[in-house]
Image (cartoon, rainbow, N blue to C red):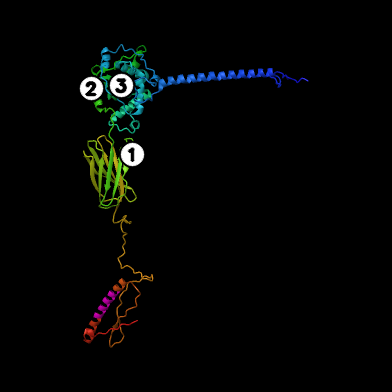
Amino acid sequence: MKKQIFKDRIGDDDYMLSGNDTNNRERLVNRIMAGGGILIAGFTIFYVITFYSLFSGGKEANAAETTELMETQPETTTEDDLNYTLFESPYSDEKIPESIKSLLDQAVLGETMVTGIMSVDNKISSVSRSAMGKNMTQYQKVKNVYDYMLYHFRLNDSGSLNEEEIDALCEGIPFKSRFDMQTAYRAERLLRNFSGTSGDYGAAFALILRKMGLEAYYVDDETESSGETREHGYTAIRIDGEYYIFDLYEEKQQMESNTSQEKENPDYTYFCAGLKTLGNDYILADVEAAAAKFESFVTLPMMNFEAMISNKSHSVYGSLEYQSSSHSDGNSDMAEGELYVSAGDTINLAGTVTSTGAENVWKLTAKIFDGNMNYLDEQEIYHQTTSSAYNEVSYTADEGRYVQLYYSVTDIYGRTCVITHIFKIWTADDYTTKPETEPVTDEPETEPLTEPASGEITEPVVPQETEQTTEPETEEQTTIREPEPETSSGEEETTEKQTESVTDETTDREETETTSRDGSEPGEAKTTESEE
Protein backbone atom coordinates (compact mmCIF):
# COMPACT_ATOMS: atom_id res chain seq x y z
CA MET A 1 0.00 0.00 0.00
CA LYS A 2 1.10 3.40 -0.71
CA LYS A 3 1.36 5.63 2.28
CA GLN A 4 -0.69 8.77 2.20
CA ILE A 5 1.72 11.54 1.36
CA PHE A 6 -0.36 14.68 1.80
CA LYS A 7 -3.22 15.57 3.98
CA ASP A 8 -5.20 18.60 2.88
CA ARG A 9 -6.31 21.24 5.35
CA ILE A 10 -9.36 23.31 4.39
CA GLY A 11 -8.54 27.01 4.07
CA ASP A 12 -4.79 26.49 4.74
CA ASP A 13 -1.87 26.23 2.32
CA ASP A 14 0.36 24.42 4.84
CA TYR A 15 0.91 20.72 4.54
CA MET A 16 1.92 17.87 6.74
CA LEU A 17 5.08 16.42 5.24
CA SER A 18 5.95 12.80 5.01
CA GLY A 19 9.49 11.72 5.74
CA ASN A 20 9.77 10.49 2.13
CA ASP A 21 8.67 13.70 0.35
CA THR A 22 11.98 15.38 -0.56
CA ASN A 23 10.55 17.98 -2.95
CA ASN A 24 8.13 19.47 -0.49
CA ARG A 25 10.81 19.56 2.23
CA GLU A 26 13.10 21.54 -0.05
CA ARG A 27 10.28 23.93 -0.91
CA LEU A 28 9.63 24.58 2.78
CA VAL A 29 13.31 25.10 3.52
CA ASN A 30 13.56 27.61 0.66
CA ARG A 31 10.62 29.56 2.05
CA ILE A 32 12.20 29.69 5.51
CA MET A 33 15.57 30.81 4.18
CA ALA A 34 13.97 33.49 2.00
CA GLY A 35 12.00 34.85 4.94
CA GLY A 36 15.06 34.83 7.19
CA GLY A 37 17.11 36.65 4.58
CA ILE A 38 14.50 39.38 4.26
CA LEU A 39 14.38 39.75 8.04
CA ILE A 40 18.19 40.01 8.34
CA ALA A 41 18.34 42.55 5.54
CA GLY A 42 15.67 44.67 7.23
CA PHE A 43 17.54 44.71 10.54
CA THR A 44 20.78 45.55 8.77
CA ILE A 45 19.26 48.53 6.98
CA PHE A 46 17.65 49.75 10.22
CA TYR A 47 20.90 49.67 12.22
CA VAL A 48 22.90 51.31 9.43
CA ILE A 49 20.44 54.20 9.20
CA THR A 50 20.30 54.59 13.00
CA PHE A 51 24.08 54.53 13.41
CA TYR A 52 24.59 57.05 10.63
CA SER A 53 22.03 59.47 12.06
CA LEU A 54 23.49 59.26 15.55
CA PHE A 55 27.05 59.72 14.31
CA SER A 56 26.32 62.68 12.05
CA GLY A 57 23.93 64.29 14.53
CA GLY A 58 26.43 63.86 17.36
CA LYS A 59 29.11 65.57 15.30
CA GLU A 60 26.85 68.51 14.58
CA ALA A 61 25.78 68.80 18.22
CA ASN A 62 29.40 68.61 19.33
CA ALA A 63 30.36 71.40 16.93
CA ALA A 64 27.51 73.62 18.11
CA GLU A 65 27.37 73.02 21.87
CA THR A 66 30.67 71.67 23.23
CA THR A 67 32.45 74.27 25.37
CA GLU A 68 34.45 72.18 27.81
CA LEU A 69 37.96 72.26 26.31
CA MET A 70 41.38 72.44 27.86
CA GLU A 71 42.71 75.98 28.08
CA THR A 72 46.01 75.17 26.42
CA GLN A 73 45.79 73.79 22.89
CA PRO A 74 48.49 73.42 20.24
CA GLU A 75 48.45 75.80 17.31
CA THR A 76 48.53 73.01 14.77
CA THR A 77 45.28 71.55 13.48
CA THR A 78 44.13 68.59 15.55
CA GLU A 79 41.15 66.29 15.56
CA ASP A 80 39.53 68.57 18.16
CA ASP A 81 39.79 71.51 15.77
CA LEU A 82 37.73 69.63 13.22
CA ASN A 83 34.81 69.50 15.69
CA TYR A 84 34.44 73.29 15.44
CA THR A 85 32.72 75.07 12.60
CA LEU A 86 34.27 78.48 12.09
CA PHE A 87 31.70 81.23 12.53
CA GLU A 88 31.14 83.26 9.38
CA SER A 89 29.85 86.72 10.24
CA PRO A 90 26.72 87.88 8.37
CA TYR A 91 27.67 91.52 9.04
CA SER A 92 29.52 93.73 6.59
CA ASP A 93 32.51 95.77 7.79
CA GLU A 94 32.03 98.61 5.34
CA LYS A 95 31.31 101.04 8.21
CA ILE A 96 34.60 100.30 10.00
CA PRO A 97 37.30 102.83 9.08
CA GLU A 98 40.49 101.55 7.47
CA SER A 99 42.50 103.30 10.17
CA ILE A 100 40.91 101.03 12.78
CA LYS A 101 41.61 97.94 10.71
CA SER A 102 45.24 98.97 10.33
CA LEU A 103 45.54 99.83 14.04
CA LEU A 104 44.42 96.35 15.11
CA ASP A 105 46.59 94.59 12.57
CA GLN A 106 49.69 96.46 13.73
CA ALA A 107 49.06 96.04 17.47
CA VAL A 108 51.88 94.18 19.19
CA LEU A 109 50.56 91.09 20.92
CA GLY A 110 51.72 90.09 24.36
CA GLU A 111 51.60 86.76 26.15
CA THR A 112 48.41 84.75 26.12
CA MET A 113 46.62 85.10 29.45
CA VAL A 114 44.29 82.63 31.15
CA THR A 115 42.36 82.98 34.40
CA GLY A 116 43.42 79.67 35.91
CA ILE A 117 39.75 78.72 36.44
CA MET A 118 39.11 75.64 34.32
CA SER A 119 35.43 76.27 33.58
CA VAL A 120 36.09 79.88 32.51
CA ASP A 121 39.16 79.14 30.38
CA ASN A 122 37.40 76.26 28.61
CA LYS A 123 34.51 78.49 27.57
CA ILE A 124 36.84 81.24 26.38
CA SER A 125 38.79 78.69 24.33
CA SER A 126 35.55 77.46 22.80
CA VAL A 127 34.59 80.95 21.58
CA SER A 128 38.12 81.61 20.33
CA ARG A 129 38.16 78.41 18.27
CA SER A 130 34.72 79.12 16.86
CA ALA A 131 35.45 82.73 15.86
CA MET A 132 39.19 82.96 15.15
CA GLY A 133 40.50 81.26 12.04
CA LYS A 134 44.20 80.54 11.72
CA ASN A 135 44.50 82.44 8.46
CA MET A 136 42.71 85.54 9.73
CA THR A 137 44.47 88.83 10.39
CA GLN A 138 44.37 90.33 13.89
CA TYR A 139 41.64 92.74 12.85
CA GLN A 140 39.57 89.94 11.32
CA LYS A 141 39.84 87.88 14.48
CA VAL A 142 38.72 90.77 16.70
CA LYS A 143 35.80 91.64 14.41
CA ASN A 144 34.68 88.03 14.07
CA VAL A 145 34.57 87.58 17.86
CA TYR A 146 32.69 90.88 18.17
CA ASP A 147 30.16 89.72 15.57
CA TYR A 148 29.94 86.24 17.09
CA MET A 149 28.85 87.73 20.43
CA LEU A 150 26.39 90.13 18.77
CA TYR A 151 24.87 87.22 16.87
CA HIS A 152 24.70 84.55 19.62
CA PHE A 153 24.19 86.39 22.92
CA ARG A 154 21.17 88.20 24.35
CA LEU A 155 20.79 91.22 26.64
CA ASN A 156 19.84 90.80 30.29
CA ASP A 157 19.61 93.70 32.73
CA SER A 158 18.72 91.69 35.84
CA GLY A 159 22.06 90.07 36.67
CA SER A 160 23.82 91.31 39.81
CA LEU A 161 26.99 90.15 41.52
CA ASN A 162 26.56 87.18 43.86
CA GLU A 163 29.54 87.07 46.18
CA GLU A 164 28.88 83.48 47.28
CA GLU A 165 28.82 82.32 43.66
CA ILE A 166 32.05 84.22 43.01
CA ASP A 167 33.75 82.43 45.91
CA ALA A 168 32.42 79.07 44.72
CA LEU A 169 33.73 79.69 41.18
CA CYS A 170 37.19 80.66 42.47
CA GLU A 171 37.30 77.95 45.15
CA GLY A 172 40.84 77.02 46.13
CA ILE A 173 42.51 79.78 44.05
CA PRO A 174 43.87 82.64 46.21
CA PHE A 175 43.59 85.47 43.68
CA LYS A 176 45.35 88.66 44.62
CA SER A 177 42.48 90.85 43.42
CA ARG A 178 38.78 90.56 44.19
CA PHE A 179 38.18 92.58 41.05
CA ASP A 180 39.78 89.81 38.98
CA MET A 181 37.45 87.27 40.58
CA GLN A 182 34.43 89.41 39.69
CA THR A 183 35.69 89.72 36.11
CA ALA A 184 36.00 85.95 35.75
CA TYR A 185 32.55 85.45 37.27
CA ARG A 186 30.91 87.87 34.82
CA ALA A 187 32.59 86.28 31.82
CA GLU A 188 31.63 82.76 32.88
CA ARG A 189 28.01 83.80 33.47
CA LEU A 190 27.63 85.26 29.97
CA LEU A 191 29.29 82.33 28.22
CA ARG A 192 27.23 79.84 30.22
CA ASN A 193 23.82 81.49 29.89
CA PHE A 194 24.32 83.11 26.44
CA SER A 195 22.88 86.29 27.99
CA GLY A 196 24.13 88.89 30.42
CA THR A 197 24.49 92.48 31.54
CA SER A 198 26.76 95.12 30.06
CA GLY A 199 29.36 94.15 32.65
CA ASP A 200 29.13 90.49 31.58
CA TYR A 201 29.66 91.43 27.94
CA GLY A 202 32.58 93.72 28.81
CA ALA A 203 34.32 91.13 31.01
CA ALA A 204 33.91 88.24 28.56
CA PHE A 205 35.16 90.21 25.56
CA ALA A 206 38.16 91.49 27.54
CA LEU A 207 39.20 87.95 28.51
CA ILE A 208 38.81 86.67 24.94
CA LEU A 209 41.07 89.48 23.70
CA ARG A 210 43.52 88.66 26.51
CA LYS A 211 43.53 85.07 25.29
CA MET A 212 44.53 86.44 21.89
CA GLY A 213 47.36 88.53 23.42
CA LEU A 214 45.90 92.06 23.33
CA GLU A 215 46.17 94.32 26.39
CA ALA A 216 42.46 94.40 27.24
CA TYR A 217 40.66 95.51 30.40
CA TYR A 218 37.16 95.18 31.80
CA VAL A 219 35.86 98.58 32.94
CA ASP A 220 33.22 98.54 35.68
CA ASP A 221 31.54 101.88 35.37
CA GLU A 222 28.26 103.41 36.46
CA THR A 223 26.13 106.02 34.73
CA GLU A 224 23.28 108.15 35.98
CA SER A 225 20.09 108.52 33.97
CA SER A 226 16.92 110.26 35.20
CA GLY A 227 18.25 110.24 38.73
CA GLU A 228 18.96 106.49 38.69
CA THR A 229 22.37 104.85 38.74
CA ARG A 230 22.85 101.90 36.41
CA GLU A 231 25.71 99.56 35.70
CA HIS A 232 27.74 100.36 32.60
CA GLY A 233 30.43 97.82 31.85
CA TYR A 234 32.54 97.72 28.71
CA THR A 235 35.95 96.74 27.34
CA ALA A 236 39.01 98.90 26.77
CA ILE A 237 42.22 97.95 24.95
CA ARG A 238 45.53 99.77 25.12
CA ILE A 239 47.61 100.16 21.95
CA ASP A 240 50.71 102.37 21.87
CA GLY A 241 49.70 104.02 25.12
CA GLU A 242 46.20 104.98 23.94
CA TYR A 243 42.90 103.45 25.07
CA TYR A 244 40.16 102.35 22.67
CA ILE A 245 36.64 101.27 23.61
CA PHE A 246 34.54 98.22 22.69
CA ASP A 247 30.98 98.32 24.03
CA LEU A 248 29.14 95.23 22.82
CA TYR A 249 26.09 95.85 25.02
CA GLU A 250 25.45 99.30 23.59
CA GLU A 251 26.07 97.99 20.09
CA LYS A 252 23.51 95.22 20.63
CA GLN A 253 20.96 97.67 22.01
CA GLN A 254 21.47 99.94 19.01
CA MET A 255 20.91 97.05 16.61
CA GLU A 256 17.66 96.08 18.32
CA SER A 257 16.37 99.67 18.26
CA ASN A 258 16.95 100.00 14.50
CA THR A 259 14.27 99.37 11.90
CA SER A 260 13.92 95.90 10.44
CA GLN A 261 15.98 96.81 7.37
CA GLU A 262 18.83 98.22 9.45
CA LYS A 263 18.95 95.28 11.88
CA GLU A 264 20.82 93.22 9.35
CA ASN A 265 24.05 95.05 10.07
CA PRO A 266 25.49 96.87 13.15
CA ASP A 267 26.76 100.43 12.89
CA TYR A 268 30.04 99.55 14.70
CA THR A 269 29.78 102.80 16.65
CA TYR A 270 31.39 101.11 19.64
CA PHE A 271 33.98 99.00 17.83
CA CYS A 272 37.52 100.16 18.79
CA ALA A 273 36.32 103.74 19.19
CA GLY A 274 38.48 106.54 20.55
CA LEU A 275 37.48 108.10 23.87
CA LYS A 276 37.06 111.53 22.31
CA THR A 277 34.51 110.29 19.80
CA LEU A 278 32.15 108.70 22.36
CA GLY A 279 31.25 111.60 24.65
CA ASN A 280 30.99 111.85 28.41
CA ASP A 281 29.94 108.25 29.12
CA TYR A 282 33.52 107.06 28.60
CA ILE A 283 36.08 108.88 30.74
CA LEU A 284 39.82 108.25 30.73
CA ALA A 285 40.01 108.39 34.54
CA ASP A 286 37.47 105.55 34.83
CA VAL A 287 39.39 103.44 32.34
CA GLU A 288 42.69 104.03 34.10
CA ALA A 289 41.14 103.19 37.49
CA ALA A 290 39.82 99.88 36.15
CA ALA A 291 43.18 99.07 34.57
CA ALA A 292 44.89 99.71 37.90
CA LYS A 293 42.56 97.29 39.69
CA PHE A 294 43.23 94.44 37.28
CA GLU A 295 45.97 92.09 38.51
CA SER A 296 46.08 89.67 35.54
CA PHE A 297 44.73 86.87 37.77
CA VAL A 298 47.91 86.72 39.82
CA THR A 299 47.57 84.41 42.82
CA LEU A 300 48.73 85.19 46.33
CA PRO A 301 51.46 83.32 48.18
CA MET A 302 50.41 80.71 50.71
CA MET A 303 49.38 82.14 54.08
CA ASN A 304 50.21 80.05 57.16
CA PHE A 305 49.69 81.10 60.79
CA GLU A 306 51.31 79.42 63.79
CA ALA A 307 50.84 80.35 67.45
CA MET A 308 52.12 79.19 70.84
CA ILE A 309 49.98 79.92 73.93
CA SER A 310 51.63 79.24 77.28
CA ASN A 311 51.77 80.06 81.00
CA LYS A 312 54.39 79.22 83.65
CA SER A 313 53.64 75.49 83.60
CA HIS A 314 51.93 74.49 80.34
CA SER A 315 51.70 75.42 76.65
CA VAL A 316 49.44 74.70 73.67
CA TYR A 317 50.14 75.00 69.95
CA GLY A 318 48.04 75.86 66.88
CA SER A 319 48.74 76.04 63.13
CA LEU A 320 46.58 76.49 60.03
CA GLU A 321 46.74 77.53 56.38
CA TYR A 322 44.35 80.09 54.92
CA GLN A 323 41.64 78.46 52.81
CA SER A 324 39.27 81.00 51.20
CA SER A 325 36.91 83.82 52.10
CA SER A 326 33.93 81.56 51.43
CA HIS A 327 35.01 79.12 54.17
CA SER A 328 35.62 81.32 57.20
CA ASP A 329 35.45 78.30 59.53
CA GLY A 330 38.34 76.79 57.61
CA ASN A 331 40.45 79.82 58.51
CA SER A 332 40.12 79.21 62.27
CA ASP A 333 41.59 76.43 64.38
CA MET A 334 41.71 75.39 68.06
CA ALA A 335 45.15 75.14 69.65
CA GLU A 336 45.95 71.58 70.70
CA GLY A 337 46.69 70.83 74.35
CA GLU A 338 45.38 72.00 77.73
CA LEU A 339 46.28 74.92 79.96
CA TYR A 340 45.90 74.92 83.76
CA VAL A 341 45.50 78.55 84.75
CA SER A 342 45.04 80.14 88.16
CA ALA A 343 43.66 83.61 88.76
CA GLY A 344 46.43 86.11 88.25
CA ASP A 345 48.49 83.92 85.92
CA THR A 346 50.03 85.57 82.86
CA ILE A 347 49.43 83.87 79.53
CA ASN A 348 51.92 84.56 76.74
CA LEU A 349 51.00 84.31 73.04
CA ALA A 350 53.56 84.23 70.23
CA GLY A 351 52.51 84.12 66.56
CA THR A 352 54.26 83.74 63.20
CA VAL A 353 52.73 84.33 59.76
CA THR A 354 54.25 83.68 56.35
CA SER A 355 55.70 87.05 55.42
CA THR A 356 54.42 89.02 52.44
CA GLY A 357 56.78 91.90 53.04
CA ALA A 358 53.89 94.15 54.03
CA GLU A 359 51.99 95.18 57.15
CA ASN A 360 50.02 92.65 59.21
CA VAL A 361 47.21 93.41 61.68
CA TRP A 362 47.38 91.42 64.94
CA LYS A 363 44.45 91.09 67.34
CA LEU A 364 43.73 89.34 70.65
CA THR A 365 40.17 89.09 71.93
CA ALA A 366 38.95 87.35 75.11
CA LYS A 367 35.40 86.06 75.65
CA ILE A 368 34.39 85.51 79.29
CA PHE A 369 31.97 82.76 80.40
CA ASP A 370 30.62 81.67 83.79
CA GLY A 371 30.94 78.18 85.29
CA ASN A 372 28.04 76.93 83.13
CA MET A 373 29.58 78.35 79.94
CA ASN A 374 27.08 81.18 79.75
CA TYR A 375 28.49 84.19 77.88
CA LEU A 376 29.30 87.15 80.11
CA ASP A 377 31.52 89.63 78.32
CA GLU A 378 34.00 90.19 75.48
CA GLN A 379 37.19 92.24 75.63
CA GLU A 380 39.64 93.34 72.94
CA ILE A 381 42.99 92.87 74.64
CA TYR A 382 45.31 93.79 71.77
CA HIS A 383 45.11 95.44 68.33
CA GLN A 384 48.33 96.36 66.58
CA THR A 385 49.59 96.80 63.00
CA THR A 386 53.21 95.81 62.39
CA SER A 387 55.47 95.15 59.43
CA SER A 388 56.88 92.10 61.19
CA ALA A 389 55.88 88.51 60.52
CA TYR A 390 56.34 87.72 64.24
CA ASN A 391 54.26 88.96 67.16
CA GLU A 392 54.10 88.59 70.97
CA VAL A 393 51.30 89.59 73.36
CA SER A 394 50.26 88.62 76.92
CA TYR A 395 46.99 88.26 78.83
CA THR A 396 46.38 88.15 82.60
CA ALA A 397 43.65 85.79 83.77
CA ASP A 398 41.83 87.68 86.52
CA GLU A 399 38.11 87.06 86.12
CA GLY A 400 35.51 84.63 84.86
CA ARG A 401 35.25 80.88 85.22
CA TYR A 402 36.11 80.15 81.56
CA VAL A 403 37.95 82.28 79.02
CA GLN A 404 38.29 81.74 75.27
CA LEU A 405 41.13 83.60 73.56
CA TYR A 406 40.99 84.54 69.86
CA TYR A 407 44.46 85.30 68.46
CA SER A 408 44.34 86.47 64.83
CA VAL A 409 46.42 88.01 62.06
CA THR A 410 45.20 89.75 58.88
CA ASP A 411 47.58 90.32 55.97
CA ILE A 412 47.59 93.16 53.44
CA TYR A 413 45.23 91.23 51.14
CA GLY A 414 42.53 90.97 53.80
CA ARG A 415 43.11 87.31 54.59
CA THR A 416 42.54 86.47 58.26
CA CYS A 417 43.63 83.40 60.22
CA VAL A 418 42.49 82.78 63.81
CA ILE A 419 43.81 80.41 66.48
CA THR A 420 41.64 79.99 69.58
CA HIS A 421 41.91 78.26 72.95
CA ILE A 422 39.49 77.92 75.89
CA PHE A 423 40.51 77.24 79.49
CA LYS A 424 39.21 77.43 83.06
CA ILE A 425 40.51 79.94 85.59
CA TRP A 426 40.97 78.24 88.96
CA THR A 427 40.29 80.34 92.07
CA ALA A 428 40.49 79.75 95.83
CA ASP A 429 36.70 79.39 95.94
CA ASP A 430 36.61 76.43 93.57
CA TYR A 431 35.04 73.38 95.16
CA THR A 432 37.34 71.13 93.17
CA THR A 433 41.12 71.02 93.32
CA LYS A 434 43.36 72.10 90.57
CA PRO A 435 44.70 69.27 88.40
CA GLU A 436 48.07 67.84 89.31
CA THR A 437 48.03 69.32 92.86
CA GLU A 438 47.74 67.76 96.36
CA PRO A 439 44.18 67.52 97.79
CA VAL A 440 43.31 70.30 100.23
CA THR A 441 41.45 69.52 103.51
CA ASP A 442 40.37 71.63 106.44
CA GLU A 443 41.29 69.06 109.17
CA PRO A 444 44.16 70.01 111.53
CA GLU A 445 47.41 68.18 111.27
CA THR A 446 47.84 65.31 113.80
CA GLU A 447 50.47 62.74 114.58
CA PRO A 448 50.16 59.82 112.21
CA LEU A 449 48.60 56.74 113.66
CA THR A 450 50.98 53.87 114.40
CA GLU A 451 50.15 50.45 113.12
CA PRO A 452 51.56 47.80 115.47
CA ALA A 453 52.77 44.41 114.40
CA SER A 454 49.50 42.83 115.44
CA GLY A 455 47.58 45.04 113.01
CA GLU A 456 45.71 47.00 115.71
CA ILE A 457 45.95 50.79 115.70
CA THR A 458 47.37 52.21 118.93
CA GLU A 459 46.36 55.69 120.04
CA PRO A 460 49.10 58.10 121.05
CA VAL A 461 50.07 57.77 124.75
CA VAL A 462 48.57 60.56 126.83
CA PRO A 463 50.29 61.25 130.22
CA GLN A 464 48.13 60.88 133.31
CA GLU A 465 48.27 63.02 136.47
CA THR A 466 49.57 61.41 139.64
CA GLU A 467 46.95 60.33 142.16
CA GLN A 468 47.01 61.61 145.72
CA THR A 469 47.09 59.00 148.50
CA THR A 470 44.43 58.94 151.15
CA GLU A 471 46.92 58.76 154.00
CA PRO A 472 46.77 62.13 155.75
CA GLU A 473 50.16 61.89 157.42
CA THR A 474 52.07 61.74 154.15
CA GLU A 475 49.62 63.17 151.51
CA GLU A 476 51.77 61.48 148.94
CA GLN A 477 50.70 61.28 145.33
CA THR A 478 51.48 58.24 143.35
CA THR A 479 52.17 58.14 139.63
CA ILE A 480 51.30 54.83 138.02
CA ARG A 481 52.60 53.81 134.61
CA GLU A 482 50.15 51.70 132.69
CA PRO A 483 51.47 48.73 130.73
CA GLU A 484 52.16 49.63 127.11
CA PRO A 485 51.68 47.49 123.99
CA GLU A 486 54.57 46.58 121.83
CA THR A 487 55.44 49.46 119.51
CA SER A 488 58.22 50.37 117.19
CA SER A 489 61.44 51.79 118.53
CA GLY A 490 60.58 55.25 117.29
CA GLU A 491 57.31 55.29 119.16
CA GLU A 492 58.95 53.96 122.32
CA GLU A 493 61.41 56.84 122.30
CA THR A 494 58.61 59.32 121.83
CA THR A 495 56.53 57.80 124.59
CA GLU A 496 59.42 57.69 127.01
CA LYS A 497 60.25 61.33 126.37
CA GLN A 498 56.65 62.33 126.93
CA THR A 499 56.45 60.28 130.17
CA GLU A 500 59.71 61.65 131.48
CA SER A 501 58.56 65.17 130.85
CA VAL A 502 55.28 64.63 132.64
CA THR A 503 57.00 62.87 135.53
CA ASP A 504 59.47 65.72 135.98
CA GLU A 505 56.68 68.26 136.06
CA THR A 506 54.75 66.20 138.62
CA THR A 507 57.81 65.72 140.81
CA ASP A 508 58.56 69.43 140.84
CA ARG A 509 54.99 70.21 141.82
CA GLU A 510 55.07 67.66 144.65
CA GLU A 511 58.36 68.97 145.95
CA THR A 512 56.99 72.47 146.02
CA GLU A 513 53.87 71.40 147.87
CA THR A 514 55.87 69.38 150.42
CA THR A 515 58.20 72.25 151.14
CA SER A 516 55.35 74.59 151.69
CA ARG A 517 53.59 72.25 154.14
CA ASP A 518 56.34 70.60 156.13
CA GLY A 519 59.10 73.08 155.73
CA SER A 520 61.33 70.31 154.52
CA GLU A 521 63.54 70.31 151.51
CA PRO A 522 62.13 69.37 148.17
CA GLY A 523 64.40 66.38 148.01
CA GLU A 524 62.65 64.77 151.03
CA ALA A 525 59.43 64.11 149.10
CA LYS A 526 58.73 60.44 148.52
CA THR A 527 56.95 58.82 145.56
CA THR A 528 56.13 55.25 144.90
CA GLU A 529 55.50 53.46 141.67
CA SER A 530 53.54 50.33 141.30
CA GLU A 531 55.18 47.55 139.40
CA GLU A 532 53.61 45.01 137.19
The residue beneath circle 2 is 284
Image x and y of residue 509, in percent: 24, 80
Name the residue: 27% across, 87% down: 474
Q: Residue 144 in the image: x percent, y percent? A: 33, 17
Q: Amino acid at mark 2?
A: Leu
Please give the label number shown on residue 126.
none
Closer to the eye: label 3 or 2: 3
Q: Which mark is residue 212?
A: 3
The kind of residue tagged 1 is: Gly
Asked whether, in this view, residue 491 is left or right of residue 51, the answer is left
Identify residue type, mark 3. Met
Q: Earlier in the sequence, mark 3 or mark 1?
A: 3
The residue nearer to you, when weighing 437 against 470, is 437
Single out the residue that lies furthest toward the bottom: 473
Element type at mark 2: helix
Q: Nearer the viewer, residue 524 or 122?
A: 122
Question: Which contiguous range is marked in magenta?
Answer: 495-508
Q: Earlier in the sequence, mark 2 or mark 1?
A: 2
Quadrant where the C terminus is found in the figure: bottom left
Q: How many marks?
A: 3
Q: For marks 3 and 1, give the one nearer the viewer.
A: 3
Alpha carbon of mark 2 to alpha carbon of mark 1: how far?
Answer: 41 Å
- Rounded to the nearest angstrom, the CA distance separating label 3 from label 1 is 38 Å
The stretch drawn in magenta includes residue 361? no
Q: Which residue is mark 1?
A: 330
Residue 155 makes an appearance in the image: no
